[in-house]
Each structure stands twice: as C-alpha cells, then as structure tokens.
Image (tube, grey):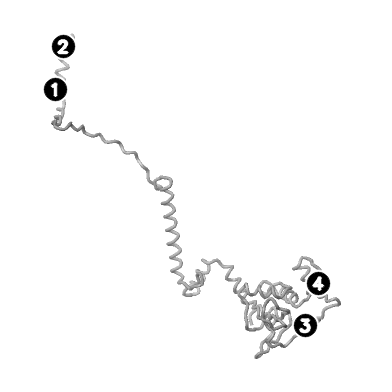
Amino acid sequence: MDPIASELLKVARSELGYREKAGQRTKYGEWYAEHVAGGDPQFETGAWCDMFIAWAADKAGVSEYVGTFAWTPSHARWFQRHQAWSDRPEPGALVFFDWGGSKKISKIDHVGIVERVEGDRIHTIEGNVDKVWLKRKVRDESKVVGYGLPRKVKEYLDQTRISWPERVVDSVRKGEPGVPLFGAPIETLSVVALLIAVAVTVLVAARARLRRATGRPAPGRHRRTARPRERAAVPPPGEAPPEPAEPPDPSRDAGAITDELTRTR
C-alpha cells in the first residue's frame, strides 16, 4: 500500500462509529466551513461524505493529493484533470457512486474510501451512510462511476513541478533511453543537441538581419573610406601620349642659380 493510502486510511479508521449531531451538524462540516469555505455556515449542516474525506486528508497531511471538496462531481473531475481517474479499485482510492447507475460524473451522489478489494466486492469506509453514520460498507461495482487515485495525483504534480530540461537531466541519471516530447519518446542527447543547434541558428540569423537593417558593420570591424586613386591623363584619339618629364639635374640647377646671383650684383 502506498504511503498516501496508508495515512488516509489510518485517520479514517480512527473515526469509525462517528454519528452526526442534531440538525445534521458534524465536526467535519464545521471544520470545512471554517477552514475551506471561508466561514459559510451552510456547510456546517450539509451532506458530509466528501467533507469527512477532506477533514481526514488534512489530518493525515495528504490534502494536496486527495483534494478538499464538498461537492462530489467536482471532486471526481479534479481527479480527471490530474490524470488520476480509474475504473479499477485499490486500497486508498476514493470511490464515487451514482445510485441511479448512470456511470456519469455529473450524476455522482456519494463518495467513500476503498479499504480493501476482495473479488468483485469493495470494502469501504464512508461518512454520511445510513443517514447518520461513519462506518464500513461492502459494495459491488454496479453503482460505481469510477475511482480517484491520490497516488496518481502525486505523480502528476511531481512531474509538472519539474521543468522540461530538468526532466531530461533526470532521465539521463536514471539511464532512461529518452523523454517524452509532444507525446512521443525522443532520445535525450538528440533532443539536447537539437535545442542547442536551433538556438544558435536563430541567434546568428537575428544578428545578420539586424546588421542588414541598420547598415552597421559586424562588431570588431571598422570601415575605412578608400582614397581616390589618381588616374593618368588619357590623350585624345590620334595623338601620341606625352613623353614623360625628365628628372631634374641637380648640377644644372645649381649653376643656374649661381648665374642668376651674379647678374643681380
């Protein structure tokens, strides 16, 4: 038996024989009105089969996995949302009944706790039975709509609390071949490599688009304005190109300067 079922049944067994007070008043309804319903007095004298389970779960410290409800159809749908709804009984499961036998959640009338299963008979602990008692009952499954499994609620919550990358790492530690992605098993290392490749590709493409849009060079590079090259003069058609100028003669230039100075004296 799983620990949640064990703790819940331990508290439920300790309450066997409880009888409601005059006016359908119960300690379970009073507790629910004060701690769950914000002081609403109508719960103090309301139908208490589900409020007893909420009270027992609180005392056992397993409310997160059992639920805290007074309305049985809402309680059953809560198990469905947490992927913890089943058609098979087990100890510690909550069993939901429709006395009309419709098998519809919207028609559920009553709820109890499965204590044990023997063949096609389920032994339960139920509150508000035979109008006033909290007692054991033996039921067949003809009126059962389904079962809520607290242990499956815990599994669901444990998975949703862990982020997807952490689930990948956890699966590697356990030696699992892969993890589910969009409902399909994929090899863990392949998934990690794929995510890295996609992230790098998106980053590079985004930076390239930004450079094109702003006209800026890539970081670390500088553009220099090219100096215009001097182009040689091109002669008109039919004319010979000019002869290159002769380099100056240093001795000739010096003599010319001396003559000029002599004449000016």
Q: How far is the residue under mark 4 from the one under mark 1?
A: 128 Å
Mark 4 neighbour density, 10 Å: few (under 14) some (14–19) many (20 or more): many
Considering only order in the chain, which callout, 4 or 2, is on the residue closer to the N terminus? 4
Q: Farthest residue to the bottom: give it.
A: 119
Q: How far is the residue under mark 4 from the one under mark 3?
A: 17 Å
Give, as a three-letter code, the residue at label 4. Glu
The residue to which callout 1 is attached is 251
The residue to which callout 3 is attached is 129
Mark 1 neighbour density, 10 Å: few (under 14) some (14–19) many (20 or more): few
Considering only order in the chain, which callout, 1 or 4, is on the residue closer to the N terminus? 4
Q: Is residue 195 left or right of residue 5?
A: left
Q: How far is the residue under mark 2 from the one under mark 1?
A: 17 Å
The residue to which callout 2 is attached is 262
Which numbered tag is attached to residue 179? none
Q: How far is the residue under mark 3 from the one under mark 1?
A: 135 Å
Nearest to viewer (mark 3 / mark 1): 3
